[in-house]
């Protein structure tokens, strides 16, 4: 006879089994997306999912950018900078540079090689990957392990520092994404076990403070591996790394971003994503809100129109002659790419395009052979001179050269365009695709019911407001497939129009994601029109910047480039100075900012608009004409634009003159923040 006690035990046992099955099916690691890996439980699921490296190819002007990188410095750093990038590099087993510069280069060279599918570049990458893998000890540590005496131009000490290994982790992630090399998983697992064991004794800041500020690159790699392997210890390591990293939450709460000299400019650009990276493990909205608040403070107290901020090298206010470092630009782009993948936030995508289309093209020469360490929003003379920067390097910071300023940017600038290309498109958790940034490209990816599609994006954007997507290929028996296509509508766009196969489909206000979910067939075409109105924004001393779509516009000036030799080899063999004989000290004549489209005259050259390289004064396809007057008291100071006249300035002289503005990214010399003067 079954007693009541036995029945209770039976039902208790069955409840435990049912609850266990429920826990297993609902809470255990699982992948809702059939094709690409999202975050495992308990990590917060990402809004979008990065595609395998090589899935996205550049076209048009963006392809030209990548080719110029290959033919320029990116493809030849081992020849241009052999003392660091050559065989003596510690990350190739040599006795030379042991720190960040070699890994920096490969962090940009590797995605370039696989996006272009260029075997020559892949061959340059491979020895760095192989040496890193072979260097791993039994305890999991890897990389250079011996310090050497100082040698000018090299960083031969601090070989055990956590920081450069974070860059190598990014390299290995990309390598796995492109090749699916299973060695990467076991290698990283062993290293992370070493970190979990060692960090309590030798904290992130044990060897240098850089690792504390840049711990997010370590943290994102830990989560990346966890999503692939599900090893529970990785979540413990994630919490440990977060606990030892610099607190950007505390920084914002202290008001550090409202003052100068509180943080290094690259640490800010690179580390600002840490709260959102960690949000995946601890989904507290304070982490996202902190980053949003940080960007507000940066914009108000340090911001510049091109999407960057005064930081030369410490955070240094919003005067348009304060420098903005090239490393900051490419690192902030990467941070925005990671944050928009996690959150799907349109603000991050808008900001990414602002940097990519304004700050990045102007700071690197057309042939991708030289760069500026710092750029200025108002930049009227590029010469070797000591200016009002927080750091200066023999007066070379503004000049174009291989190693001018400090060599970190020569090593790190290479990741900008390749990673931008890699993050144009994402997979979505509902088996679709999302376009978060716009540029000419082509994507091949799995969608819908395990179907591979190829979609071509044809556009001259950002030099045009029309973008066309064409379904080039559908690889299944039906030759059709159903999936959602997400299109970002930038906040600057008042009203976007979408047509499908030539017929109007829908309109959408800016700041939204449009989702088109339908059955697609080959040759289906989606036309996206993002009308670009001219607008204004307000900056330092109440100055005004002229904008249209994602582009900032700046005074067009003649440019006289002069090549000069260096006597100090650590700055490279030569540099370029750039000067102009044309006046620059214009104030825009006062106008109704609500009617700027009536005041400004726009001219678009359709031939130049189709150029494969629009990013210089000669090829700039868009001009905006504005009325201006000279401000005689606004003169050169310390070989740069002097103290900014406050708007409204009544001290202008002379008759009205029509001046020409062109896209900021097409300029080298410029004024982009204009005082306002009387008629």
Image (cartoon, rainbow, N blue to C red):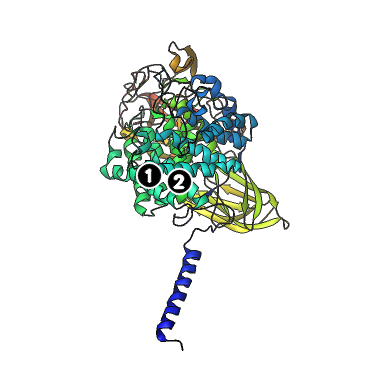
Q: Nearer the viewer, residue 304 or 410?
A: 410
Q: Is label 2 in contact with label 1 (beta carbons under 8 Å)? A: yes
Q: Quadrant of residue 644?
A: top left
Q: Which mark is residue 222?
A: 2
Q: Is residue 525 left or right of residue 173?
A: right
Q: Residue at x 38, y 41 (%)?
A: 198
Q: Which mark is residue 241?
A: 1
Q: Nearer the viewer, residue 521 or 250?
A: 250
> Which quarter of the rendering shows the C terminus?
top left
The x and y percentages for residue 646 are 30, 31
Tell which residue pokes out farthest to the right in this image: 477
Q: Residue at x 46, y 48 (%)?
A: 223
Q: Quadrant of residue 629?
A: top left
Q: Is residue 580 visible?
A: no
Q: Is residue 479 left or right of residue 398?
A: right
Q: Residue at x 49, y 29 (%)?
A: 91
Q: Is label 2 in a helix, a strand or a loop?
A: helix
Q: Nearer the viewer, residue 463 or 134?
A: 134
The Cα–Cα distance between marks 2 and 1, rounded to whole angstroms, is: 10 Å
In the rendered view, tell whether residue 491 sits above or below residue 575.
below
Q: Is label 1 in a helix, a strand or a loop?
A: helix
């Amino acid at each position: 006879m079954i007693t009541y006690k036995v029945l209770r035990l039976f039902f208790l046992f069955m409840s435990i089994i049912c609850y266990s099955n429920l826990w297993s099916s609902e809470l255990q690691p699982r992948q809702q997306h059939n094709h690409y890996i999202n975050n495992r439980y308990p990590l917060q699921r990402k809004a979008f999912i990065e595609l395998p490296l090589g899935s996205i190819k550049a076209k048009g002007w963006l392809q030209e950018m990548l080719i110029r990188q290959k033919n320029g410095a990116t493809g030849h750093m081992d020849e241009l900078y052999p003392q660091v990038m050559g065989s003596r590099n510690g990350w190739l087993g040599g006795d030379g540079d042991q720190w960040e510069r070699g890994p920096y280069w490969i962090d940009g060279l590797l995605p370039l090689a696989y996006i272009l599918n260029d075997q020559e570049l892949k061959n340059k990458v491979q020895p760095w990957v192989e040496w890193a893998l072979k260097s791993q000890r039994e305890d999991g540590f890897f990389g250079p392990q011996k310090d050497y005496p100082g040698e000018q131009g090299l960083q031969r000490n601090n070989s055990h520092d956590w920081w450069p290994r974070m860059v190598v982790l990014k390299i290995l992630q990309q390598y796995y994404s492109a090749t699916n090399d299973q060695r990467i998983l076991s290698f990283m697992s062993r290293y992370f076990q070493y970190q979990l064991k060692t960090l309590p004794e030798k904290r992130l800041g044990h060897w240098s403070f850089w690792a504390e500020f840049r711990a997010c690159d370590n943290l994102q790699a830990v989560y990346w591996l966890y999503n692939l392997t599900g090893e529970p210890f990785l979540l413990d390591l994630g919490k440990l790394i977060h606990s030892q990293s610099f607190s950007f939450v505390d920084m914002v709460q202290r008001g550090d971003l409202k003052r100068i000299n509180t943080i290094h400019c690259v640490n800010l650009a690179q580390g600002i994503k840490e709260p959102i990276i960690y949000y995946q493990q601890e989904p507290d909205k304070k982490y996202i809100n902190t980053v949003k608040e940080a960007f507000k403070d940066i914009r108000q107290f340090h911001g510049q129109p091109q999407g960057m901020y005064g930081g030369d090298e410490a955070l240094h206010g919003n005067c348009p002659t304060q420098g903005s470092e090239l490393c900051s630009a490419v690192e902030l782009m990467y941070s925005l790419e990671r944050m928009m993948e996690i959150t799907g936030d349109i603000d991050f995508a808008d900001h990414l395009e602002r940097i990519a289309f304004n700050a990045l093209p102007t700071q690197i020469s057309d042939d991708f052979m030289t760069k500026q360490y710092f750029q200025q929003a108002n930049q009227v003379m590029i010469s070797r001179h000591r200016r009002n920067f927080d750091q200066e390097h023999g007066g070379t910071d503004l000049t174009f050269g291989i190693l001018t300023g400090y060599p970190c940017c020569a090593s790190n600038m290479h990741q900008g365009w390749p990673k931008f290309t890699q993050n144009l498109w994402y997979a979505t958790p509902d088996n679709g695709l999302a376009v978060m940034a716009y540029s000419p490209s082509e994507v091949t990816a799995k969608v819908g019911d395990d179907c591979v599609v190829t979609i071509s994006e044809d556009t001259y954007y950002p030099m045009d407001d029309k973008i066309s997507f064409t379904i080039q290929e559908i690889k299944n028996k039906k030759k059709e497939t159903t999936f959602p296509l997400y299109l970002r509508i930038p906040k600057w766009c008042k009203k976007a129009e979408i047509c499908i196969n030539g017929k109007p489909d829908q309109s959408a206000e800016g700041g939204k994601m449009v989702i088109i979910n339908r059955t697609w067939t080959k040759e289906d075409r989606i036309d996206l029109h993002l009308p670009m109105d001219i607008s204004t924004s307000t900056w330092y001393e109440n100055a005004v910047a002229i904008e249209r779509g994602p582009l900032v516009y700046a005074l067009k000036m003649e440019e006289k480039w002069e090549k000069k030799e260096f006597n100090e080899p650590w700055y490279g063999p030569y540099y370029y100075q750039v000067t102009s004989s044309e006046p620059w000290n214009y104030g825009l004549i006062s106008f109704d900012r609500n009617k700027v489209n009536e005041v400004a005259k726009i001219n678009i050259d359709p031939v130049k608009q189709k150029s494969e390289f629009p990013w210089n004064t000669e090829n700039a396809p868009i001009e905006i004409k504005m009325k201006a007057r000279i401000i005689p008291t606004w003169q050169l100071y310390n070989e740069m634009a002097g103290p900014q006249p406050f708007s409204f300035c009544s001290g202008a002289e002379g008759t009205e003159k029509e001046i020409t503005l062109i896209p900021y990214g097409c300029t080298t010399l410029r004024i982009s923040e204009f005082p306002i003067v009387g008629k």
